[in-house]
Every structure is written in structure tokens, then in C-alpha cells.
Amino acid sequence: MGDGTHLGKVRGLGSSGHGSQHWLQQRLTALGNILLVGFFVVSLIRLPLGDHAAVLRWAANPMVALALILMVVSVFWHLRLGLTVLIEDYVHGPMLLLATVLLNFYAIGGAVYGIFTIARIALVPVMAAGPGGM
Amino acid sequence: MAGNEPNTRPRAPHLQVYKWGPAMAVSILHRASGDGLAIVGVGLFLWWLGAIAGGPEAYAAFVACVWRDPSPEITLFHQVTNILGKIVLVGLTWAFFQHLFSGLRHFVLDTGAGYELKSNKLWSTVVIAAGIAATAATWLYIMAEAL
């Protein structure tokens, strides 16, 4: 492992210096997840999930859409931290780089898809009402 | 190292070496449930969101695949996915509660409390039992509502 020499740093060995940041972000996003995923799970249990109109009305509510977008951010941030540690524990060598890149594609791509979809659900009724129609 | 000679360095003992206990189980379940939620749970969530945005037909197709196909003649594919969907949903419910309770345990451990052998063993067992109990309670509630 790296011993703090310049060569070790160039090779990316040893401590990255971001350990406490990772640790703190994992806890803070965990707090966010307790609130936001908790709200989401309770909503799921109470919603008539077979009824598209009812689910759409719920998700299009501005406060719900806002909570869902915040949940996507918190969840994807948290899962990226968690899966990073998983990959670092079990994937070694050149596959480590590939797995890390794939994880980032998944985390960023999934989060953007989720946020875009929620925004579309929330804003389509507004756009359908046309200009001036609120 | 040339890379061809067998590695004679001592290796860290792995899972099969240790005697299983609640603390070890809860630690592994925390990772397993987290990974399940991160990949399967989030994947299903994004699929569901896309189906809501896609409109009534897309949403009906999603429900017919994951939960129940209302058509009189259900395809073999949907017969399989209807069962698989329920198993996955129960599994995700358990993973959610397991990861939540285990995460709360980690918040307590972060304060430096709960490392004494007895209390560590006790709360590890409580987390596992609570995860199973909460999952059972949730699905009993859902089934009672559905009937």
C-alpha cells in the first residue's frame, strides 16, 4: 500500500484523504433517507396503487413532487457511497476502475432519469393548461 | 512480484472461519439489504415512475407485469412475473426495514455506545427480529386492506 510517498500518491495508493467526508455524507444522507423514504413508503401503503389517475394526482402534487426529487437525490447519493465501499472491498485490479465508472453512470443516470420523470409528472398538467391557464 | 508464483502471504480469515453470531449477521445483512435496495429497489422505483409518466396504458402494463394481470387469459410470462413481483416486493419491504433498523443501530454505535458484548448481541438480535416483524406487519396490513 502507499506509504505517503509521491509515487504512492500518483498511483492512488493509501489514504485518499476523503474518509471523514465519505463517513459524514453517508450519515447525513441516511438522515435524509429516514425522512424522505419513510414518507414515500407510508404513501405507497396508503395509495390505491392500481389506480393510475390517483397515483398521478398524488405524484403531481407540488409538495409530493418536491419530496420525491429530494428523495432521489438523497437515495442516489447514499447508494453511491455504499456501493463504492462494496466495490472497493470486492473488486480489485483493472476491474475496479470499470466497476467504479459503471457505478457513477448508474448513480448519475438513474438520478437524472428519476428527477426528470418526476418533473414531467408534476409539470405536464400545468403545460396542458396552456399559457395563462393556471 | 512477477505474478506467477503462488501467493504465500498470510491471508485474512474470511466468513467461513468465524463462528456466526448476531453482530456478524446484522453487519452482513446491512450490506446485503442496502445493495438490494440500491439495485433492485431503485430499479423498480424508476420503472414505476416511468410508468406513471407514460400514461394510463403504460401504468396498466406495469401493474399487469409486477402485480396482477387482469386479462382473462394470462400469458405464462405474466403468470411468472406476477409471482416473482410479489416475492421481490416482500423482499424489498424486508430490506427496507432491515436497513432502516440496522442504520439506526449504526447511529447509536457512532456515539460510542452499545459495544459491550451483551448489549451488542442483544441489539443485533433485536434489529433482525424487528426487521422480520415489521415486514410481516406491513404485509398483513396490506392484505387486510386488499380483502
Image (tube, helix red, strand yellow):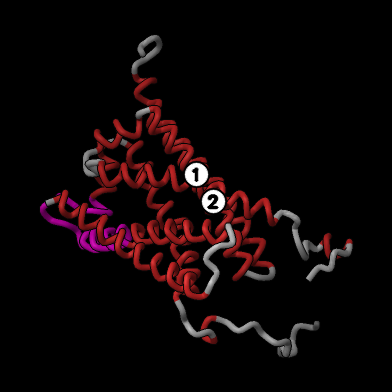
In the displayed structure, A29 sits above or below A9; it is above
Describe residue A128's horizontal placement relative to residue A22 as left or right.
Answer: left
Q: Which mark is residue A32?
A: 1
As for residue B66 lying within the magenta part, the answer is yes
User: Which quadrant holds residue B60?
Assistant: top left
Q: Which mark is residue B47?
A: none
Residue type at mark 2: give it.
Answer: His
Within 10 Å of the Cα at label 2, are there few (<14), some (14-19), or many (20+) other Cα atoms? many
For the residues beneath circles 2 and 1, the answer to whether they share a chain is yes
Residue type at mark 1: give it.
Answer: Gly
Find out whether the residues at labels 2 and 1 contact each other: C-beta distance under 8 Å: yes
Name the spot of residue B98 as percent of width and height, x first. 40, 61
Q: CA distance from mark 2 to mark 1?
A: 9 Å
Q: Which residues are magenta?
A: B64-90
Describe residue A82's horizontal placement relative to residue A7 as left or right.
Answer: left
Q: Residue at x 33, y 42 (%)?
A: B51
User: Disc 2 or disc 1, which is closer to the eye?
Assistant: 1
Q: Which residue is mark 2?
A: A78
User: Which quadrant holds residue B97?
Assistant: bottom left
Quadrant containing the C terminus of chain A in the rendered view: top left
What secondary structure is the stretch in magenta mostly built from? helix
Of all residues shown, which one is farthest toward the right?
A: A6
